[in-house]
Structures are given as structure tokens and as C-alpha cells.
């Protein structure tokens, strides 16, 4: 099959987008449900709970960024979409850190955000401390993003 490299590269871009985006949707959804409950009691806390809800959304953005990088490198977004199967597999492998770390970290960050929203509902003055807990989960999404980007940028330009 002549287009096997493109297929593998597209699969990598799709996994980065789909898995990280799915995690973000789950995390944002959980936090949104918790935020709605707090806002029903005290609408003045909107700004604080919104920040908690937005935190798990970043993993989906990271996955999308890696997908765009892969699509441009394999020639789908301009250039010659003719790469070897080996190179396509390398792009697929490069997508996996953000795909899986994005999925799981966004879900867990959503859980931490729900807890932070609960804290804010009872003690709004503890916002600074409460926001650090879900922010710590973000660290692992950022590390996965860096590894995926380094891998994508360092795949040899030669047609392997």
C-alpha cells in the first residue's frame, strides 16, 4: 500500500486529538456540573469556578497542537503527502504521549477541579490554595506535550 505512511501519520494526529480531547471533555463536564451547583447558591463565585472548569480543557488544546504539527509534517496541510510507512509510524509513536497523558490527566484534573470548586463554595478565601491542586496535574500534561513535540520535530527529514 503506497499511502501507508500517511495513514499512520493521520492515525497519530487523530489519536492526539481524540484521546486528549475526550479527556478534556470529561474533565470540563465534571467541573461544569459542580460549578453549576455552586452558582445556583452563589452566582458571585462565577469567576472563580470558571477557572476551575477551564483547567482540564488545556489537554485537548495540547492534543490539537500536536495533531496540527503532525499534519503539517506529513504534508496534509501543504507539501508533499508522500511519506514512508516507517516515518508514518514514527509520527504515530510521537502522538502517543500527549494522547494518553492528555486523556488521563484531564479526567483527573477535572476531579481535582470538582474538589476545588467544593472548597470555594464553602471557603472562597482559599482560592489560591485550592487552584494549586488541579494545577499540579497539569504538569504531567505539559511534560507529555513537550515529549510529543520534541519527537515530532526530531523525526528525520529523510524519507525513511
Image: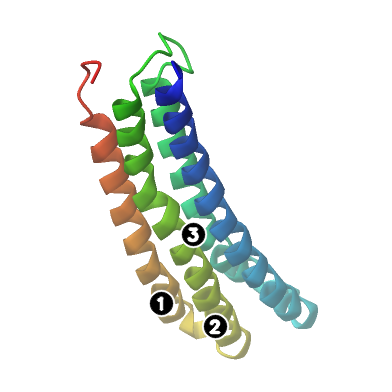
x and y percentages locating residue 75 in the rendered image:
42, 16
- Mark identifier at residue 116: none
Quick one: SS at disc 1? helix
* Residue at the image point whose x is 54% and y is 70% from the top: 110
Q: Which of the two labelled residues, at mark 1 and mark 3, occupies the earlier sequence position?
A: 3
Q: How is the image coloured?
A: rainbow
| Circle count | 3
155 vs 137, left or right, is left
Camera-near label (3 vs 2) is 3
On the image, numbered disc 3 is attached to which residue?
A: 103
Residue at image location 54% in from the left, 76% down from the top:
111
Percent from the top left, x then y, of residue 159? 25, 16
* Viewer-nearest residue: 70 or 42: 70
Nearer-N-terminus badge (3/2): 3
Give 30 or 88, whichever is nearer the viewer. Answer: 88
Relative height, residue 9 to residue 76 (above, below): below
| Residue 27 sits above or below residue 128 on the image | above
Give the residue at mark 1.
133
Q: Quadrant of the N terminus?
A: top left
Q: Dots 3 and 2: beta carbons under 8 Å?
A: no
Residue at x-position 52% and y-position 61%? 56
Camera-nearest residue between 36 and 18: 18
Residue under numbered circle 2: 115
Amino acid at each position: 500500500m503506497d499511502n501507508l505512511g500517511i495513514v499512520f501519520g493521520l492515525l497519530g494526529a487523530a489519536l492526539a486529538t481524540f484521546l486528549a480531547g475526550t479527556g478534556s471533555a470529561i474533565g470540563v463536564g465534571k467541573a461544569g456540573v459542580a460549578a453549576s451547583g455552586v452558582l445556583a447558591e452563589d452566582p458571585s463565585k462565577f469567576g472563580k469556578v470558571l477557572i476551575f472548569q477551564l483547567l482540564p480543557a488545556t489537554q485537548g488544546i495540547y492534543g490539537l497542537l500536536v495533531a496540527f504539527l503532525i499534519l503539517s509534517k506529513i504534508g496534509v496541510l501543504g507539501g508533499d503527502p508522500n511519506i514512508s510507512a516507517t516515518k508514518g509510524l514514527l509520527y504515530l509513536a510521537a502522538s502517543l504521549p500527549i494522547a494518553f497523558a492528555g486523556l488521563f490527566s484531564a479526567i483527573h484534573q477535572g476531579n481535582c477541579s470538582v474538589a476545588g470548586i467544593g472548597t470555594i463554595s464553602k471557603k472562597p478565601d482559599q482560592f489560591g490554595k485550592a487552584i494549586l491542586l488541579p494545577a499540579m496535574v497539569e504538569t504531567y500534561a505539559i511534560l507529555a506535550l513537550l515529549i510529543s513535540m520534541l519527537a515530532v520535530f526530531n523525526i528525520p527529514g529523510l524519507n525513511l
